[in-house]
Image (cartoon, coloured by chain):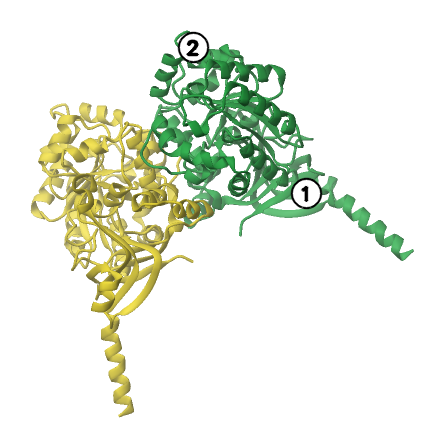
Chain colours: A green, B yellow
Amino acid sequence: MSLWIGLSLVSASQALAEVKAYRASILHFTGDPARLGEQAYQYFQDGALVIDNGSVRDVGPHSEIAKKFRDAEWVDYSGRLIVPGFVDTHVHYPQTEMIAAYGEQLLQWLNTYTFPTERKYKDYDYARKQSRFFIDQLLRNGTTSALVFGTVHPESVDALFDEASRFNMRLIGGKVMMDRNAPDYLVDTAETSYAESKALIQKWHGKNRLLYAITPRFAPTSTPEQLAAAGRLKAEFPTTYVHTHVSENPSEVEWVKSLFPERSGYFDVYEHYGLAGEHSVFAHGVHLTDSEFDRIAATRSSIAFCPTSNLFLGSGLFKLLPALDKGIRVGMGTDVGAGTSFSMLQTMNEAYKVVQLQGQKLSSLQSFYLATLGGAQALGLDDKIGSFKTGNEADFVVMNWGATPLSKLRNKNSKTLQEKLFVLLTLGDDRNVVETYVAGKRVYRAK
Amino acid sequence: MSLWIGLSLVSASQALAEVKAYRASILHFTGDPARLGEQAYQYFQDGALVIDNGSVRDVGPHSEIAKKFRDAEWVDYSGRLIVPGFVDTHVHYPQTEMIAAYGEQLLQWLNTYTFPTERKYKDYDYARKQSRFFIDQLLRNGTTSALVFGTVHPESVDALFDEASRFNMRLIGGKVMMDRNAPDYLVDTAETSYAESKALIQKWHGKNRLLYAITPRFAPTSTPEQLAAAGRLKAEFPTTYVHTHVSENPSEVEWVKSLFPERSGYFDVYEHYGLAGEHSVFAHGVHLTDSEFDRIAATRSSIAFCPTSNLFLGSGLFKLLPALDKGIRVGMGTDVGAGTSFSMLQTMNEAYKVVQLQGQKLSSLQSFYLATLGGAQALGLDDKIGSFKTGNEADFVVMNWGATPLSKLRNKNSKTLQEKLFVLLTLGDDRNVVETYVAGKRVYRAK
């Protein structure tokens, strides 16, 4: 009988342990603060987040939640801030090892640094090792979901997804399709890219939390035949993503015009081949015209805004607020390795600067919205991640408000939530991330 | 007799202890790498720096120095990098506590955030406490010299200099002169500003390593009478500095035109009142015209380039390389509180981006030159600081090459000095500063 009781207790405590409650200041969004004002977010200064078996069960003031979930396993993060895990809508994992490569704008940068590096990812073991490092970088920066470029090699995608599976991450990735204007060692063909992408889709798309993105690098490195093949794939597997670049750099835009003279513009190339749409994410869009913005909006396509990259490569200033005003879904992207940081805080810092240089203002609330729910919306995943809506997948970050003497001082003398968040994003970095949770499990803890 | 031997040993070891030798990788400059190429710098991968009683005695390869200074007290920083202490050519210490203030461009930012904050510095004790925090921020970022704005209150300067004296820092500061277009609680008059500045000059200028800067805030907040008084001070005390702002923001430039319609432009206001010259440092200069650049060059005035601030306030992109091409001396400035970091590495990171956005390249060597010797030259102090020339004052920083898993990886796979420095400045921050020395004494050590 004592044995029976023992077993029963274990099993009862396991059942209880599945419900965990975290006490902290909690912030999450229901929409864009620039549109909805105070309706756009919930902030509980003394709040609690309840996670049940990897999903959000409840969120609210601690006083209420404490009564409802007396028997949950409580974790006290009082004085800290919990936000939904950051969503990085554009990043190249094989470029992690070449971040901070000197001196070039886009096209020369690709030839000089990127292509030779990506060559190495044909080797699964190498790619796996680098995937591990990459995912560690995401988690230590509080990023729990990302839309990720691999290389042209299917092995690069297998390695990334194998590694992401260890953490049950909600990750989207794909093999690069690239059949011209790149070194011989790095090109596929319209046919092989179709076949390899299709095999990867069948293997990975929808497996656990993983999703597949059809990933033509950008129009200049794909023949019309390959873009048509990408379009066929998208038609065959309509729930997959399309992930590519558009209008990042003026020379690139001119190049596309010369390669596709029959199309009205850069974005029209993608639209023509059936690659625009609700699950299509276009990185950068710095030089999109007003009418191209209209087409992005009309096709319900998304843009990944990558400020540290746009500044680092001298690409230009993305028209963020005009894009949002057109109803375009925009997420934040680090775009490592052209971006200079995995930190979504540093990305927000430079996003603010890009907007300031255009004489406009990006509020801290809107920044945190874009880095969480906004990113999830850009990926069409806001029914799963990006906020603490009941039933959502439990990806979240525990942050401290200040990690250095300066940011502690500045947080202390901040009066409003908006001000505290602005200090956090302006002075913050990976040091502000204390713990990161994916699907309800802690996967990173700062030393 | 044993007592006598004991004393003798102590005194001999004290004499020896005055010569200290530091083994590390050592980099310093003799000029601008963009002009002098490899002649512009010395780099000793396994080097040594010899400090004798607070001054540089020698620098070179460790193998040579080790033979010459066998009896020195050796400190082994092998694997680390020693560079001259960074020189911050423009920073406002009272704005430390309001860094990262949201949402405004220059003129509104001053009214909304800056003036109410500066009011507090009338109180010496408060100013002293904040000075302590400020100087700690400099030192933990490897900055050993700075040209510093106080507030309108003489107390703010006394506090700053009292605190800098504790470390025997080479610091330049001054009381703000401001007699219009500012709140009543923050203005002086032409007469009081002259008298107070004069008293501060007599008290502080040349005391130990401290130097005084005549500091009219900027043309819009000084009457012609006050600018004339500033010019008289400069004429009376020709070795003092002039420290002010010029052409930071388009609205400001227009305002100056309307306030001084008789002058040909913003810079001409200062030149007219006798405030241009070899010891005059003008912060920003983002919107200077080509002919104003010529006048800056002709008067041997300097410019403080403040990239994080220019982006944060949306001021614009300083034409760094064109200014240098005209022979203008340019130093780097953090411009905290409008700048977003005390780190000269982060300042270099954004300097690179500002230059990239103009389609030009700023090399890592040139960046480190600007942050050390270039800054010293801009302040006319290159016979004292900014390099390891024999006899120079021994201000230096011991840095690690990588402080995070990412920067360690990236440093490891870098092949050249240029590449390593570029990674350091792109990914680096205060964590890369291990120890800071001022006048031969260690004044900061990372925990």
Numbered label tally: 2
Residue under mark 1: which chain is it in? A
Q: Is residue B331 above or below residue A216?
A: below
Give the label on residue A409, or none: none
Residue under mark 2: which chain is it in? A
Question: Is A144 positioned to the left or the right of A57 in the image?
Answer: left
Viewer can see residue A207: yes
Question: Is B224 positioned to the left or the right of B169 in the image?
Answer: left
Q: Residue furthest right?
A: A1
- Kindly check if marks 1 and 2 are in contact, taking CB atoms under 8 A apart as contact: no
Question: Is B327 positioned to the left or the right of B7 in the image?
Answer: left
> In terms of depth relative to the viewer, which is nearer, A48 or B64?
B64
Give the label on residue A291, or none: 2
Would you name the residue on which mark 1 appears? A21
- The disc labelled 2 sits on which kind of residue? Ser
Residue at image position (74%, 45%) is A17
- The disc labelled 1 sits on which kind of residue? Ala
Q: Is residue B53 above or below residue A22?
A: below
Q: Is residue B442 above or below residue A413?
A: below
In the rendering, at what x and y percent does residue B401 appear?
37, 50
Viewer can see residue A401: no
> In terms of depth relative to the viewer, which is nearer, B268 or B141?
B141
> In terms of depth relative to the viewer, which is nearer, A242 or A143?
A242
